[in-house]
Amino acid sequence: MNPASAHDVLFHRHEGNPILTAADWPYPVHSVFNPGATLLPDGTTLLLCRVEDRTGLSHLCAARSANGVDGWVIDPEPTLRADAETHPEELWGIEDPRITYVKELGRFAIAYTAFGKAGPGVSLALTEDFRTFERCGLVMQPDDKDAALLPHRIDGSFALIHRPMADSGAHVWMSLSPDLRNWGSHKLVLPARKGGFWDANKVGLSPPLIETDAGWLMLYHGVRRTASGSIYRLGVALLDHEHPDVCLARGNAWVFGPEAVYEREGDVANVCFPCGTTLAADRDTLRVYYGAADTSVALATGSVREILRWLRAHGS
């Protein structure tokens, strides 16, 4: 299939970007980025941001907005801190949350990266209100990250999308569990491509999968290493609804990448890294919240229908 052309613009940057920076925080921090996102029952948008403090370690902090764009009310202190005393895997901080509401549990499941001496692993925490949390602990051993839970069971089991690092490379996998603690049935979902492709070096889940009539829409980040460093861009794929380990279509070209100054310049240049989306009541209008250059939070909007249409035309 033909790659995307310059006219295939699927995501539109918010004119007020970046929408959150360290300067907005009510306590001293270095940078704010890679937020998980969800809609609360009253329609409020909640972003659970990765916040790097001035020690260099990260914690998670919630910001709430009535319209999901501005007027953010930020928790006056960290919402979820690393707890190295009872969870040594969090010794060097917690990072990059993805939020899924699990109706069966009546709670939000937060998959996040716990960083310890062994490297990054995947941990889970459950909450009803983003005030108190039940930690499930480490569910995927290092080196593993970029994880999110599906909102309901698959063939009777909870399903987790995640990205382990192995000798074979950095690919997206799915694992199943009866109880959110014990995991198995590991299956490869989306491999990094080889050669000169834009996602040749590694891929990882960006926000949690989006359930559509056509299947599970996956927004994923792909990395290509260049002589001047790595570039993080966004691609799309469609997974089978009943069997999410089966990829039905994958875009050949990236659809969103660092172009604006706040995406090209920062602590880590040339990074667009979404961890959260919200979907409007029309089930089509998509808001994508992403980290820009590991420094700030930015917003882009798109249409689920248009993304699926593009994927049919430009996928393989």
Image (cartoon, helix red, strand yellow):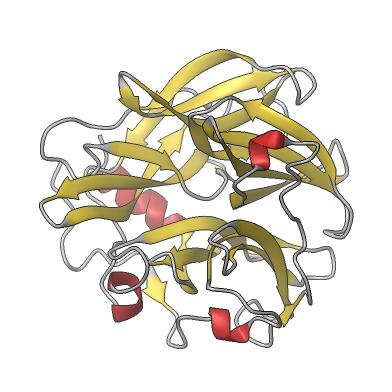
**Placement of the N terminus among the 4 image quadrants:** top left
Q: Is residue 309 left or right of residue 83?
A: left
The answer to whether 138 is drawn above or below residue 313 in the figure is: above
Q: Specify the quadrant of the image occupied by residue 213.
A: top right
Q: Is residue 29 left or right of residue 237?
A: right
Q: Position of residue 142 (x, y in %)?
A: 53, 28
**Placement of the C terminus among the 4 image quadrants:** top left
Q: Foreground: 258 or 87?
A: 87
Q: Position of residue 241 (x, y in %)?
A: 56, 30
The answer to whether 307 is drawn above or below residue 7 in the figure is: above
Q: Residue at x 85, y 48 (%)?
A: 133
Q: Position of residue 152 (x, y in %)?
A: 73, 33
Could you tell me if residue 150 is visible in this image? Answer: no
The answer to whether 86 is drawn above or below residue 263 in the figure is: above
Count of numbered circles in the view: 0
Q: Foreground: 280 or 32?
A: 32
Q: Specify the quadrant of the image occupied by residue 84.
A: top right
Could you tell me if residue 222 is visible in this image? Answer: yes
Q: Residue at x 22, y 42 (%)?
A: 252
Q: Residue at x 24, y 37 (%)?
A: 201
Q: Foreground: 205 or 141?
A: 141
Q: Is residue 228 left or right of residue 297?
A: left
Q: Position of residue 118 (x, y in %)?
A: 53, 29
